[in-house]
Image (cartoon, helix red, strand yellow):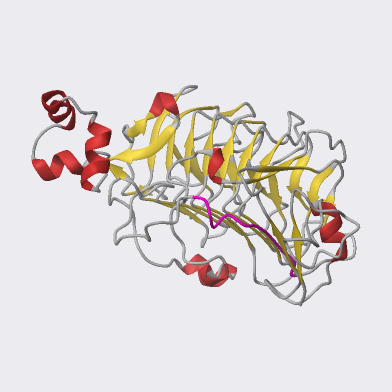
């Protein structure tokens, strides 16, 4: 299959054959040139590059459509190898930016079966950001992306509305960040899907923030999100009855909803999660569709983020989320066709450290405070004594 290249200095009159002197300028045009394949990775690949000196913004004023021409198996990836891994939620770790501010079409990206999108920062979309026209126009994968100010305020618009499939394999959204977005992730119809290692903060939704229907939500973090729908709308939700669906290893903190912070339907498992402070109703933390299903090994406690006010949602070393997750595969992975090999090893957002056993709860693995634990003294006291910032001490001795 072919590989096409898009750069900030390219031209859509080129052939897209390389990134040096024959690249395309727009992503929409590059997608239109691709040919379909079979399954994930079976179609053509489009590589989108930052500029030679830094970030590059691609202003896409019309829909990027994988559905036109049925571009099955196409991979659209940002080339980010020269940039550091994302250790927090810093948008500058995503050097290829897609800006949809001037796109007024119904869809910013119209998806199709077995399409993979990975590595982008996406901003300015006021319509359906990544979606599909039909509930069986999937599965799809969206990986390692950062979304800010996307999907506007229309009650019917989502940042990602993941379609299902007529077969067993289902959509996966992994290691993505949603900042100040409307309705970050929702299953199209009642399909099963996986939402893994994702962060949503300062998002407002008419429906649940993360809604996997009859799928799975794991290692996700949601902070300062508001759901202004009724009592059937939640922050993390698997609302469609299926025993294999579950929510685990996730954190919801300082959110507002008339529903529950974490909700699973009848006979679904909520396990090893932290739910802290529902600003609407303090009693609505964990909820299930039947009274005999409980939140196993889960807590209503402060997760102890590194710097809550600065939106740094890595956990401190003293956090109750540290090494408090549950390890291993769940039966849902097999029954839903959610094959982790398709998305790479399941790990945290920043992709530096694979899951420990047991893992931390939440979307990030970093545990702040090891340096003073090693020395046996409070980090701030060390800093005051030698007149050095405690963070610099950590960097100097090579530990968090």
Q: Is residue 272 visible to the viewer in this orientation of the structure?
A: yes
Residue in front for this viewpoint, 226 or 270: 226
From the viewer's perspective, is residue 244 above or below residue 27?
below
Whether residue 219 sits left or right of residue 189 in the image: it is: left
Task: Work out whether residue 66 can be spotted.
Answer: no
Left or right: where 240 falls relative to 198: right
Q: Nearer the viewer, residue 88 or 108?
A: 88
Percent across and percent down for residue 20 are 73, 61
The residue stretch that appears in magenta:
73-83
Does 398 lie within the magenta span? Answer: no
Q: Is residue 77 magenta?
A: yes
Quarter of the figure with the C terminus: top left
Based on the displayed image, in which of its 4 quarters is residue 75 positioned? bottom right
Residue 317: % across, % down: 24, 41
Q: Quadrant of the N terminus?
A: bottom right
- Report the residue at 47% width, 66% height from top: 345
Q: Residue furthest front?
A: 21
The image shows residue 316 at horizontal and vertical percentages of: 29, 38
């Amino acid at each position: 299959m072919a590989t096409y290249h898009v750069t900030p200095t390219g031209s859509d009159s080129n052939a897209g054959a390389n990134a040096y002197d024959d690249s395309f300028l727009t992503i929409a045009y590059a997608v239109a040139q691709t040919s379909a394949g079979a399954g994930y990775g079976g179609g053509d690949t489009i590589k989108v590059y930052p500029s030679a000196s830094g970030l590059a913004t691609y202003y896409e004023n019309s829909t990027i459509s994988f559905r036109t021409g049925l571009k099955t198996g196409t991979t659209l990836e940002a080339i980010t190898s020269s940039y550091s891994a994302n250790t927090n939620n810093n948008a500058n770790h995503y050097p290829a930016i897609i800006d949809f501010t001037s796109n007024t079409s119904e869809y910013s990206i119209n998806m199709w079966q077995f399409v993979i999108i990975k590595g982008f920062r996406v901003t300015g979309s006021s319509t359906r950001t990544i979606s599909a026209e039909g509930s069986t126009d999937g599965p799809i994968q969206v990986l390692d992306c950062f979304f800010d100010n996307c999907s506007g305020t229309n009650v019917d618009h989502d940042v990602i509305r993941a379609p299902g499939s007529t077969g067993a394999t289902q959509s996966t959204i992994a290691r993505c960040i949603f900042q100040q977005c409307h309705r970050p992730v929702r299953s199209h119809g009642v399909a099963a899907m996986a939402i893994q290692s994702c962060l949503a903060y300062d998002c407002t939704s008419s429906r649940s923030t993360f809604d996997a229907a009859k799928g799975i939500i794991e290692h996700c973090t949601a902070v300062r999100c508001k759901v202004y729908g009724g009592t059937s709308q939640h922050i993390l939700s698997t609302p469609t009855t299926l025993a294999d669906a579950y929510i685990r290893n996730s954190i919801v903190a300082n959110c507002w909803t008339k529903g529950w912070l974490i909700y699973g339907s009848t006979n679904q498992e909520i396990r090893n999660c932290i739910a802290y402070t529902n600003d609407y109703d303090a009693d609505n933390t964990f909820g299930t569709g039947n009274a005999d299903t409980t939140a196993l090994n889960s807590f209503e406690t402060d997760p102890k983020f590194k710097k809550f006010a600065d939106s740094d949602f890595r956990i401190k070393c003293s956090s109750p989320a540290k090494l408090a997750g549950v390890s291993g595969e769940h039966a849902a992975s097999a029954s839903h066709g959610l094959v982790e090999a398709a998305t790479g090893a399941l790990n945290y957002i920043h992709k530096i450290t694979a899951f420990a056993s047991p893992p931390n709860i939440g979307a990030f693995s970093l545990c702040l405070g090891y340096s003073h634990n090693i020395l046996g003294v409070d980090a701030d006291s060390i800093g005051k004594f030698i007149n050095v910032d405690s963070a610099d001490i950590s960097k100097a001795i090579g530990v968090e």
